Amino acid sequence: MNVWKGSTHIRSKAAIEAEERIGLRLGAIVRAATMTVIAVWLFFQVPLEEVAFYWVLLAAFILTGWLPYHFRLREETRNWVFYLFPLLDAALLTYTLLAPNPLDKENLPAAMLLRLGNEIYFFPIIASAVFYYRPLMLIWSGVCVAVTWTLGTLWIASQPDSRLFRWQEYRALSSQQQEIAYFLAPERVDLNTLGTQIIVFMLVAGCLALLVSRFQGLLIGHAEAERKRSNLTRYFSPNIVEELADADEPLGEARSQDAAVLFADVIGFTRLAEMQSPEKVFNLLRELLSLMAREVFLHNGTLDKYLGDGVMATFGTPRNNGHEARDALACARAILSGVAEWNEKRERKGEPRLEIGIGLHYGPVVLGNVGDESRLEFAVLGDTVNVASRFERLTRNLNVSLVVSGDLIAALSDQDQPHAMGLTPCRPEKIRGRDRPVPVWTL
């Protein structure tokens, strides 16, 4: 259980780090675009002899936007390094808003810089920490903004031409005109306003941290769901997994539809098993069944079940795609080709060849869930399944590798007819369960 939890934690952490890389890159692009727009806007709003100062600062903001992404790409970077960037952003913006422009010959009184409402520019700085996908980074960003803006405001308040706003002095004034003059005095610094600003900064940071925490939970849940789906595909066909995952009642009631059915089996496997150790036989089966299953999935098939030394697969289940006969025939050829290559490797190792017999049939089947509510299994039943199984056994009597029903050949569309090349029509064969001989083709 501890190993499972540790593995889940590692996968979740990897998913969050991958999203963080994407987020930091997106954040850097957005910041660069935003700074470029601001640079153009300043060109028309600020005298040309003063705008260069702000352009340099905007370029610095673009650089600090790309640095976190650059360091995230380097796996050896320690996590504490990323906590420097919100501090750098907050300090740089505080300097931008409060430092006098050296190119401006007529600077405003220092305290007037606190009256311009420019503290709103800190909110994008706090919001940009969202791209780290770390709640703690949002809180830290709010703290950095609060600290740097507080230091900047206190620095302004300490200037010789600044005066603190004192409520005792304000209440002692005798007229409204005096109150307005006191309040609007350009040298006045109100630390009560600073307190309100800090509270708002931290509230915004806290709300965004909760949002990111919620996003982390969703991301971890998504990673866990993908893990479960990946595990399901080890035991069920991918198309069955998708059907189960994407619909509320994916398979519904039992229904009848046309489908192609494939049976593949090793010829003479019992004799081979007697000649080798159980471990070798087991490894042999794993290789062979993996090869068959891979081809079934590649050709849009559903692996119905493993049959000891063979497989049963269906095509056109749980949903038809219009090319079930073609997919089944292409899959049979791919299995035979794969087994031929596999046999060549075995012969080079001095191991015996394995022969495969495959039977294919096309026709109506009944499909749906079987079992009780606690354990359901998707099943495909009907005469078409039985006939396909008997065609597979017929390969031994006819000494061929593939027996295909005339019904499947007839089900091939005009554009799919080339897939029947190489198949030879044979005289109809009598099989158990059918009154009349059945037309067959062989390879």
Image (cartoon, rainbow, N blue to C red):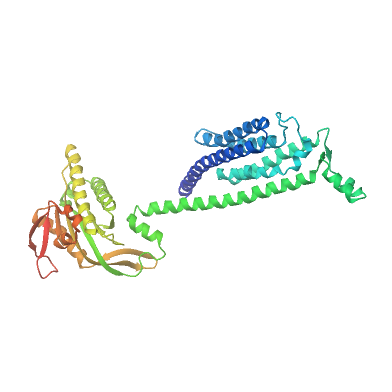
Camera-nearest residue between 393 and 158: 158
State the residue in front, 55 or 387: 55
In depth, the one of 384 and 350 nearer the eye is 384
266 left or right, relative to 89 = left
The image quarter in which residue 254 lies: bottom left
Q: Residue at x 20, y 67 (%)?
A: 383
The image quarter in which residue 96 lies: top right
Q: Whole-percent x and y of residue 181? A: 86, 45
- On the question of residue 69 being in view, the answer is yes
Q: Is residue 7 left or right of residue 169?
A: left
Of all residues, the one furthest to the right in this rendering is 174
Q: Is residue 151 shown above or below 312?
A: above
Q: Position of residue 68 (x, y in %)?
A: 55, 36
Q: Is residue 392 above or below residue 349?
A: below
Q: Residue at x 51, y 53 (%)?
A: 218
Number of marks drawn? 0
Q: Residue furthest left?
A: 427
Can I make out residue 136 in this image? no
Residue at (24% x, 63% y) in the render = 259
